[in-house]
Image (cartoon, rainbow, N blue to C red):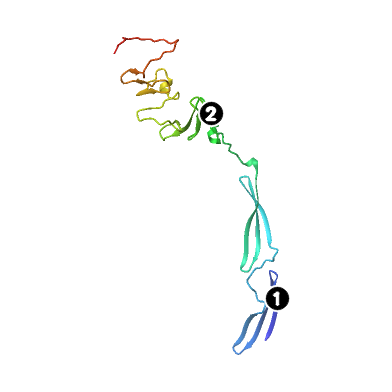
Amino acid sequence: AIANSYTNIVFGYSNTYTNTVGAAANGWANTLAVSSNAWANTVGINSTAIANSYTNTVFGYSNTYTNTVGAASNGWSNTIAVAGLAYTAANTSQYTANLAFDKANTGGVPISDVAPSNPAANSLWWSSDLGRLFVFYNDGSSAQWVEASPDTLASNQQLVSKINTALQNSTGAFAGTLTVTGGVNTNTISTSTNVASFGTALRILANGDIVISGNIIML
């Protein structure tokens, strides 16, 4: 047989092939034999790896990625690692919240004679005039300041204060019975009977006046 050998170098690997032509009774027999260091169909990368870094800038944010090709028995190993994060101030916009100042939102409770304006829901306020704590309550249909710890009253009683607009206005009307306590006696003014009743006596200050515009009825 006539043997011709040659070496094919691919990607740094030397593979020696032997082309043998042998005589046969019915013609030529051509065989192609691969030597012991046959082509392995694998691509190997040395331990130092090949690293390519690039920077991708999107909306003013610069992200540096490292593309590393590492050795692996079954081919290529690709990893992307973020090496850094930066941004360009000129290409960004910042939002600054401009909220109305409310001490109730900063952990404190505002103290004043007048209720804070434009309060947020669940805000607190201590009335220095009334000496009471109020919470701004929204029940879904209306929002108002209500006492955090109201007095215990009977079902036919109602606690009123200066924040009641019916009592603030000179022409306001108050429906029901108004009971005033805290003096020597208990005084009741009933709108249903147009009668003002006093406990045991009607006391007028020394510099006060009694004005009667109707008849005096003795009972």
Quarter of the image containing the C terminus? top left
Q: Please, what secondary structure does the residue beneath circle 2 have?
A: strand
- The residue lying toward the viewer, choosing from 202 and 215, is 202
Mark nearer the N terminus (2 vs 1):
1
Using the image as rendered, state which of residue 209 and residue 148 is in the foreground: 209
Relative height, residue 108 to residue 13 (above, below)? above
Q: Nearer the viewer, mark 2 or mark 1?
A: 2
- Among all residues in the image, which is located at the extreme left? 219
Against 13, residue 175 (above or below) is above
Amino acid type, residue under disc 1 in the picture: Thr
- Number of disc labels: 2
Specify few, some or many for label 1: CA neighbours under 10 Å numbering under 14, 14-19, or 20 or more: few
Q: Is residue 175 visible?
A: no
Amino acid type, residue under disc 2 in the picture: Ile
Q: Quadrant of residue 94?
A: top right
Between the residue at mark 2 and the residue at mark 1, the CA separation in whole angstroms equals 96 Å
The x, y position of residue 161, in whole percent, is 44, 24
Q: Which residue lies under the disc numbered 1? A: 7
